[in-house]
Image (tube, rainbow, N blue to C red):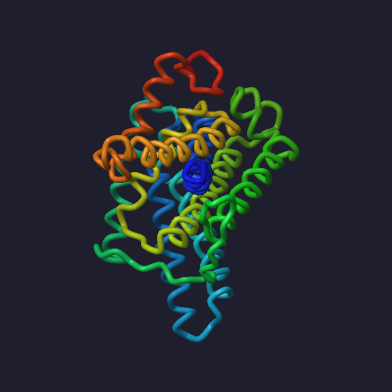
Amino acid sequence: MDIFLQQIINGLVQGSIYALVALGYTMVYGIMGLINFAHGEVVMIGTLIAITVIGSLVQAGVPALFAGLAGMGAAVAGCMLLGWGLERVAYRPLRNAPRLTPLITAIGMSIILQNVAMIAWGRNYLTFPPILPKVDLEFAGANFTLIQVIIVVVSALTMGALLFLIYRTKLGMAMRATAQNPAVANLMGVNSNRVISAAFVIGSALGALAGIMVGTYYEIAHYQMGFMLGLKAFTAAVLGGIGNLVGAMLGGILLGIIEALGAGYIGDLTGGFLGSHYQDIFAFVVLIVVLMFKPSGLFGEKTGDRA
């Protein structure tokens, strides 16, 4: 039981990160029907910005906690600006183009951002500066850290705040109206361009927050880190039901738990052959099985093709 609880805790931490990144995918898809494959690179850029700012401030003698908050602010602001720029420059001109064109553009932007990050920060792995004390905790035989607790709590609060924004504010109402029918929303006075830009900006801010969590948790960052993280988060969004906010959250958490349990239990049964290095297998196998029986995802609704 203590091993099971340990894997559940590890899965919750990883799944909370997946969920934050998945929200960026599902917000944009729910409104535009676009899969923004450059979103993983936005997360990576946020992590590298945070490393640069925090490292510089710590070297200047600023306390680690204040340096971390400043780094978080810089990362969120930088990613929000980047998300706005991507929508304005790369996607808005192609809004009425055939579906495949924006998708190819998104993949191209992903490659461009990777190369820009490689030029700016180099090819080597970067160490994320410690901003929180390493405090070990224990519950029912399972070990975890203060950082893991903070990641889960912050993720839960952030996702709750996003749901409040979507379902209890005028901006959220405008987003839901635009997702239902952009043309009718425009006739009702909704500026669809601003709504779509807001979706990119908010999703990018969530991605930056997730990137800081990844850096704090694993203590390293790399210019290619966004590819697999983005792919996993996209998988979580599809698993939960792409376009469904609650589904993206639950899909991310479920994906993290599946990976943790698969790496822990199946890895032991196979003598370590299918251990942590092969944990990606478990997530994608489950995704394939779920989509075979429920193509719209666990919490998605079957809808017609978008115009």
Count of numbered badges drawn on the protein: 0
Q: Is residue 290 above or below residue 64?
A: above
Q: Quadrant of residue 284?
A: top left
Q: Give the x, y percent position of residue 104.
A: 31, 34
Q: Give the x, y percent position of residue 191.
A: 63, 37
Most foreground residue, 287 or 203:
287
| Residue 47 appearing in the image | yes
Left or right of 261 in this view: 206? right
Q: Residue at x 35, y 33 (%)?
A: 282
Q: Quadrant of residue 39?
A: top left
Left or right of 73 in this view: 266? left
Q: Residue at x 38, y 33 (%)?
A: 283
Q: Is residue 54 above or below residue 140?
A: below
Most foreground residue, 26 or 28:
26
Q: Give the x, y percent position of residue 118.
A: 27, 60
Left or right of 54 in this view: 37? left
Q: Residue at x 53, y 34 (%)?
A: 248
Q: Residue furthest bottom?
A: 61
Q: Residue at x 51, y 46 (%)?
A: 2
| Residue 18 appearing in the image | no
Q: Is residue 219 above or below residue 192?
A: below
